[in-house]
Amino acid sequence: DKAMQVHKTNERVVRPFPAIDVVTVKLREPWGIEFSPRSSNLGALVSSISPKGSAFKALPRIEPESMLLRVNSDDCRLRVYTSVQRVLERARDAGPITTFQLLPPRFIQGGKHFTVRLPLPLGVALEDVGDADEESGVRIAAVTPNGHAHQHGNIRVNMRVRSINDLDATRATVTDVYAYLSKLDKTKPVTLELASPYYIIGKTKTFKLTLPLGLGLEEDNESGHVYVMEV
Protein backbone atom coordinates (compact mmCIF):
# COMPACT_ATOMS: atom_id res chain seq x y z
CA ASP A 1 0.00 0.00 0.00
CA LYS A 2 2.29 2.75 -1.29
CA ALA A 3 -0.19 5.53 -0.52
CA MET A 4 0.30 4.92 3.20
CA GLN A 5 4.07 5.08 3.07
CA VAL A 6 4.60 8.57 1.64
CA HIS A 7 7.30 10.26 3.73
CA LYS A 8 5.62 12.58 6.17
CA THR A 9 7.79 15.59 5.23
CA ASN A 10 6.07 15.51 1.83
CA GLU A 11 2.61 15.53 3.42
CA ARG A 12 0.24 18.27 4.36
CA VAL A 13 -0.57 17.06 7.83
CA VAL A 14 -3.56 17.84 10.02
CA ARG A 15 -2.33 18.97 13.44
CA PRO A 16 -4.15 19.22 16.77
CA PHE A 17 -5.39 22.73 17.52
CA PRO A 18 -2.92 24.97 19.38
CA ALA A 19 -3.22 25.36 23.13
CA ILE A 20 -4.40 28.60 24.72
CA ASP A 21 -4.16 29.88 28.28
CA VAL A 22 -1.47 27.40 29.27
CA VAL A 23 -0.64 27.62 32.98
CA THR A 24 3.06 27.32 33.85
CA VAL A 25 4.06 26.82 37.49
CA LYS A 26 7.35 25.98 39.19
CA LEU A 27 6.85 23.70 42.20
CA ARG A 28 9.19 22.56 44.95
CA GLU A 29 8.90 19.15 46.59
CA PRO A 30 6.57 18.11 48.04
CA TRP A 31 4.38 19.18 45.11
CA GLY A 32 1.14 18.20 46.82
CA ILE A 33 -0.47 17.47 43.47
CA GLU A 34 -1.87 14.11 42.36
CA PHE A 35 -2.63 12.98 38.82
CA SER A 36 -4.96 10.40 37.33
CA PRO A 37 -5.22 8.92 33.82
CA ARG A 38 -7.54 10.45 31.25
CA SER A 39 -10.44 8.38 29.90
CA SER A 40 -8.39 7.55 26.79
CA ASN A 41 -5.43 6.50 29.02
CA LEU A 42 -3.32 9.04 27.12
CA GLY A 43 -1.95 11.85 29.26
CA ALA A 44 -3.00 12.77 32.78
CA LEU A 45 -5.34 15.10 34.66
CA VAL A 46 -4.93 16.86 38.01
CA SER A 47 -7.01 14.78 40.44
CA SER A 48 -6.30 16.51 43.77
CA ILE A 49 -4.25 19.27 45.39
CA SER A 50 -3.03 18.93 48.99
CA PRO A 51 -2.84 21.92 51.37
CA LYS A 52 0.55 20.58 52.49
CA GLY A 53 2.22 20.92 49.07
CA SER A 54 3.63 23.81 47.06
CA ALA A 55 0.84 23.45 44.46
CA PHE A 56 -1.65 24.74 47.05
CA LYS A 57 0.06 28.14 46.93
CA ALA A 58 -0.53 28.25 43.15
CA LEU A 59 -4.33 28.09 43.55
CA PRO A 60 -6.52 29.12 41.77
CA ARG A 61 -4.17 28.94 38.78
CA ILE A 62 -3.96 25.15 39.16
CA GLU A 63 -7.42 23.63 38.83
CA PRO A 64 -8.61 20.05 39.36
CA GLU A 65 -9.19 18.27 36.03
CA SER A 66 -6.51 20.40 34.33
CA MET A 67 -4.59 18.47 31.69
CA LEU A 68 -0.86 17.89 32.20
CA LEU A 69 0.91 19.14 29.08
CA ARG A 70 4.57 19.05 30.07
CA VAL A 71 6.86 18.29 33.01
CA ASN A 72 10.12 20.19 32.60
CA SER A 73 11.05 19.38 28.97
CA ASP A 74 8.98 16.17 28.71
CA ASP A 75 5.80 16.40 26.64
CA CYS A 76 3.08 14.35 28.40
CA ARG A 77 0.08 15.04 26.17
CA LEU A 78 0.07 11.75 24.26
CA ARG A 79 1.95 9.46 26.62
CA VAL A 80 0.22 6.45 28.14
CA TYR A 81 -0.36 7.01 31.85
CA THR A 82 2.39 4.62 32.98
CA SER A 83 4.85 6.66 30.93
CA VAL A 84 3.59 9.88 32.54
CA GLN A 85 4.28 8.31 35.94
CA ARG A 86 7.87 7.59 34.91
CA VAL A 87 8.27 11.21 33.78
CA LEU A 88 7.08 12.40 37.20
CA GLU A 89 9.49 10.04 38.96
CA ARG A 90 12.41 11.40 36.92
CA ALA A 91 11.35 14.96 37.76
CA ARG A 92 11.33 14.16 41.49
CA ASP A 93 14.82 12.68 41.22
CA ALA A 94 16.07 15.73 39.28
CA GLY A 95 14.59 18.23 41.84
CA PRO A 96 14.40 20.50 43.69
CA ILE A 97 12.25 22.66 41.33
CA THR A 98 9.94 21.14 38.72
CA THR A 99 8.19 23.11 35.97
CA PHE A 100 4.64 22.01 35.13
CA GLN A 101 2.59 23.18 32.17
CA LEU A 102 -1.16 22.62 32.54
CA LEU A 103 -4.24 23.29 30.45
CA PRO A 104 -7.35 24.37 32.41
CA PRO A 105 -10.36 22.05 32.05
CA ARG A 106 -12.55 24.64 30.29
CA PHE A 107 -10.30 24.38 27.22
CA ILE A 108 -10.36 20.58 26.93
CA GLN A 109 -12.73 18.32 25.06
CA GLY A 110 -12.44 15.09 23.10
CA GLY A 111 -9.78 12.51 23.93
CA LYS A 112 -12.16 9.57 23.48
CA HIS A 113 -11.91 6.42 21.41
CA PHE A 114 -13.91 6.27 18.20
CA THR A 115 -14.29 3.86 15.30
CA VAL A 116 -14.21 4.58 11.56
CA ARG A 117 -14.53 2.43 8.44
CA LEU A 118 -12.27 3.40 5.53
CA PRO A 119 -11.60 1.89 2.10
CA LEU A 120 -8.05 0.90 1.17
CA PRO A 121 -5.66 2.60 0.69
CA LEU A 122 -6.25 4.38 4.00
CA GLY A 123 -4.32 7.51 3.07
CA VAL A 124 -2.26 7.75 6.25
CA ALA A 125 1.38 7.21 7.14
CA LEU A 126 2.01 5.39 10.42
CA GLU A 127 4.92 5.35 12.84
CA ASP A 128 5.93 3.59 16.04
CA VAL A 129 4.99 5.37 19.26
CA GLY A 130 8.16 4.08 20.96
CA ASP A 131 10.32 6.60 22.80
CA ALA A 132 12.82 6.57 25.64
CA ASP A 133 10.17 4.91 27.80
CA GLU A 134 9.69 2.12 25.23
CA GLU A 135 5.98 2.65 24.69
CA SER A 136 4.33 0.21 22.31
CA GLY A 137 1.78 0.78 19.59
CA VAL A 138 1.49 2.94 16.48
CA ARG A 139 0.13 6.38 15.71
CA ILE A 140 -0.74 8.43 12.66
CA ALA A 141 2.31 10.32 11.43
CA ALA A 142 0.74 12.02 8.38
CA VAL A 143 -2.54 12.29 6.51
CA THR A 144 -2.48 12.15 2.69
CA PRO A 145 -4.27 15.16 1.12
CA ASN A 146 -7.57 14.11 -0.48
CA GLY A 147 -7.03 10.50 0.64
CA HIS A 148 -9.70 8.43 2.36
CA ALA A 149 -8.60 9.45 5.87
CA HIS A 150 -8.45 13.14 4.89
CA GLN A 151 -11.91 12.97 3.31
CA HIS A 152 -13.33 11.51 6.51
CA GLY A 153 -12.53 14.81 8.24
CA ASN A 154 -11.96 13.65 11.82
CA ILE A 155 -8.64 11.82 11.51
CA ARG A 156 -5.59 13.76 12.64
CA VAL A 157 -1.87 13.38 13.13
CA ASN A 158 -0.85 11.85 16.50
CA MET A 159 -4.00 9.79 16.93
CA ARG A 160 -3.17 6.36 18.35
CA VAL A 161 -4.34 3.32 16.40
CA ARG A 162 -5.92 0.95 18.92
CA SER A 163 -7.13 -1.74 16.52
CA ILE A 164 -7.47 -2.56 12.83
CA ASN A 165 -10.29 -5.05 12.25
CA ASP A 166 -9.36 -7.86 14.66
CA LEU A 167 -5.71 -6.80 15.07
CA ASP A 168 -4.79 -5.32 18.48
CA ALA A 169 -2.52 -2.44 17.46
CA THR A 170 -1.74 -1.26 20.99
CA ARG A 171 1.11 -3.77 21.24
CA ALA A 172 2.02 -3.94 17.54
CA THR A 173 4.85 -2.26 15.64
CA VAL A 174 4.39 -0.26 12.46
CA THR A 175 5.98 -3.17 10.57
CA ASP A 176 3.34 -5.53 12.01
CA VAL A 177 0.53 -3.19 10.98
CA TYR A 178 1.77 -2.67 7.41
CA ALA A 179 2.25 -6.44 7.03
CA TYR A 180 -1.33 -7.02 8.22
CA LEU A 181 -2.76 -4.37 5.87
CA SER A 182 -0.89 -5.81 2.88
CA LYS A 183 -2.76 -9.11 3.31
CA LEU A 184 -6.27 -7.61 3.43
CA ASP A 185 -8.82 -7.74 0.63
CA LYS A 186 -8.42 -4.34 -1.08
CA THR A 187 -12.11 -4.31 -2.06
CA LYS A 188 -13.37 -4.35 1.55
CA PRO A 189 -13.33 -1.41 3.98
CA VAL A 190 -11.15 -1.52 7.10
CA THR A 191 -12.44 -0.83 10.62
CA LEU A 192 -10.09 1.37 12.66
CA GLU A 193 -10.41 2.17 16.35
CA LEU A 194 -8.54 5.40 17.09
CA ALA A 195 -7.70 7.26 20.29
CA SER A 196 -8.14 10.95 19.71
CA PRO A 197 -5.61 13.48 21.00
CA TYR A 198 -7.02 16.37 22.97
CA TYR A 199 -8.79 19.19 21.18
CA ILE A 200 -8.79 22.78 22.30
CA ILE A 201 -11.83 25.02 22.37
CA GLY A 202 -11.99 28.76 22.82
CA LYS A 203 -12.26 32.01 20.92
CA THR A 204 -9.43 33.83 19.18
CA LYS A 205 -8.44 37.06 20.89
CA THR A 206 -6.70 40.04 19.26
CA PHE A 207 -4.64 42.55 21.23
CA LYS A 208 -2.63 45.63 20.30
CA LEU A 209 0.52 45.91 22.44
CA THR A 210 3.50 48.24 22.46
CA LEU A 211 7.06 46.92 22.48
CA PRO A 212 8.53 45.34 24.49
CA LEU A 213 5.64 42.88 24.74
CA GLY A 214 6.62 41.41 28.10
CA LEU A 215 5.77 37.90 26.98
CA GLY A 216 7.76 34.67 27.18
CA LEU A 217 7.18 32.64 24.02
CA GLU A 218 7.97 29.02 23.22
CA GLU A 219 7.70 27.07 19.97
CA ASP A 220 6.37 23.51 20.06
CA ASN A 221 8.78 21.51 17.89
CA GLU A 222 6.11 18.92 17.19
CA SER A 223 3.31 21.17 15.93
CA GLY A 224 5.16 24.38 15.00
CA HIS A 225 2.74 26.45 17.11
CA VAL A 226 4.07 29.27 19.28
CA TYR A 227 2.64 29.45 22.80
CA VAL A 228 2.62 32.27 25.36
CA MET A 229 4.28 30.62 28.37
CA GLU A 230 4.96 33.59 30.67
CA VAL A 231 3.68 37.13 31.16
Image (cartoon, rainbow, N blue to C red):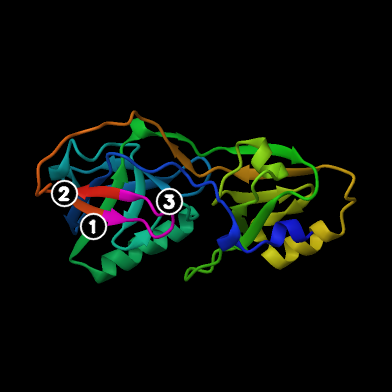
Label 3 crowd bin: few (<14), some (14–19), many (20+), radius 10 Å: some
> Quick check: can you spot residue 53?
no
Q: Are marks 3 and 2 in contact (CB under 8 Å)?
A: no
Where does the N terminus fall, quadrant-wise?
Answer: bottom right
Label 1 crowd bin: few (<14), some (14–19), many (20+), radius 10 Å: some
- Residue 188 magenta: no
Q: Amino acid at mark 1?
A: Thr
Q: Sequence order check: which comes first, mark 2 or mark 1?
A: 1
- The residue sitting at 87% across, 59% down in the picture is 183
Q: Sequence order check: which comes first, mark 1 or mark 3?
A: 3
Secondary element type, mark 1? strand
Secondary element type, mark 3? loop
Q: Identify the residue position indicated by label 3 in the image.
A: 77
Separation of residues labelled 1 and 3 (CA atoms): 15 Å
* Residue 95, x across and y down, in percent: 21, 67
Q: Tell me if residue 65 comes above or below residue 8 in the rendering.
A: above
Q: Amino acid at mark 3?
A: Arg
- The residue sitting at 18% across, 55% down in the picture is 26
Rendered image: mark on residue 39:
none
Q: Identify the residue position indicated by label 2 in the image.
A: 215
Looking at the rendering, the stretch of residues picked out in magenta corresponds to: 218-226
Residue mark closest to the camera, 3 vs 2 = 2
Secondary structure mostly seen in magenta is loop
